Image: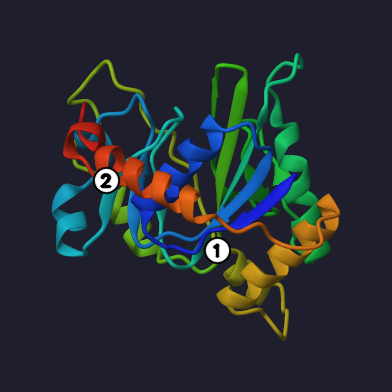
Amino acid sequence: MELIFSPSTISSFNLAAEEYLFSTQKECFFVYVNEPSVIIGYNQAVVNEVDMDFCIENDIRVIRRLSGGGAVYHDLGNLNYCFISNKTDAPLSADFLQPVVHVLQKMDIPAEIGKRKDLWLPGGHKISGTASHVSKGRELHHGTLLYESNLEHLHRALNPEKRDLVAKATASVLSPVKNIGSFLQEKGEKNVLSFDDFVSRFIDESMKYFNVSELTSFSASDLEAIETLRQTKYSQREWNYKM
């Protein structure tokens, strides 16, 4: 298992990187942070999920991903994780979340797996939504971790006036959310980590879990391939607004 921390916060780059890694034979755990953006599922309609006026006013990008599921909000207070591997014969389950739960619990964050392969905190607040993509003997599972995201922007970006303009599109399932940092403060933690320190600790604990001594970096050829995919697909309106 290789651990890769993205050198970029450009949403289109990181989604292109996921697809590129999926197309290789690598087994990896890819971690990244995105600039403010709405990431919509493969089968979703932008007009059903996104308040475009708010996103334009606040420079929030809209990018379509490979996997299904609902729309999510990313920003510089949200950590994203992605497991990519060869497909096994085992049925799809929430087992891919076990490493994330282990790492969070090592950080005294009592995350639990929910019914929809998501992560919740005590009190009934979601901190991580997930989605999966399986194709050609490969599988990808990715998710979010809200730590100090702008929850006002999250709610407004994902709250259009009408959710049924395109009836055939997959609809998001709304859930109450909370930032991990806020939860820790309410719990009485005296030294709540900054987001950057949270990311560093998360990566350190992940390396211990997978018994990895160092992070893997993208090679020059990797970066070239990812950038080509970013420009020809994930930066294109035809892909992002195709429904």
Inspect the image, locate mark 1, and give the three-letter code of the amino acid beneath it.
Asn
Q: Position of residue 55 (x, y in %)?
A: 21, 55
Inspect the image, locate mark 2, and give the three-letter code of the amino acid beneath it.
Gln
Quarter of the picture containing the C terminus is top left
Q: Secondary structure at mark 1?
A: loop
> Left of 98 or right of it: where is 86?
left
Q: Secondary structure at mark 2?
A: helix
- The relative height of residue 211 versus residue 94 in the rendered view (above or below) is below
Q: Position of residue 122 (x, y in %)?
A: 70, 54
Q: Nearer the viewer, residue 203 or 43?
A: 203
* Residue 207 sits in quarter: bottom right
Q: Nearer the viewer, residue 179 or 12?
A: 12
Please report the residue visible at 44 percent of the width from the left and 67 percent of the height from the top: 76
Packing grade of label 1 (10 A; few <14, some 14-19, many >=20) is many
Asked if one can make out residue 131 in the rendered structure from this viewpoint, the answer is no
Q: Position of residue 113 (x, y in %)?
A: 71, 40
Please report the residue visible at 23 percent of the width from the left and 26 percent of the height from the top: 164
> Left of 234 or right of it: where is 187?
right
Distance of label 2 from label 1 (alpha carbons): 32 Å
Packing grade of label 2 (10 A; few <14, some 14-19, many >=20) is few
Q: Which residue is mark 2?
A: 231
Q: Which residue is mark 1?
A: 179
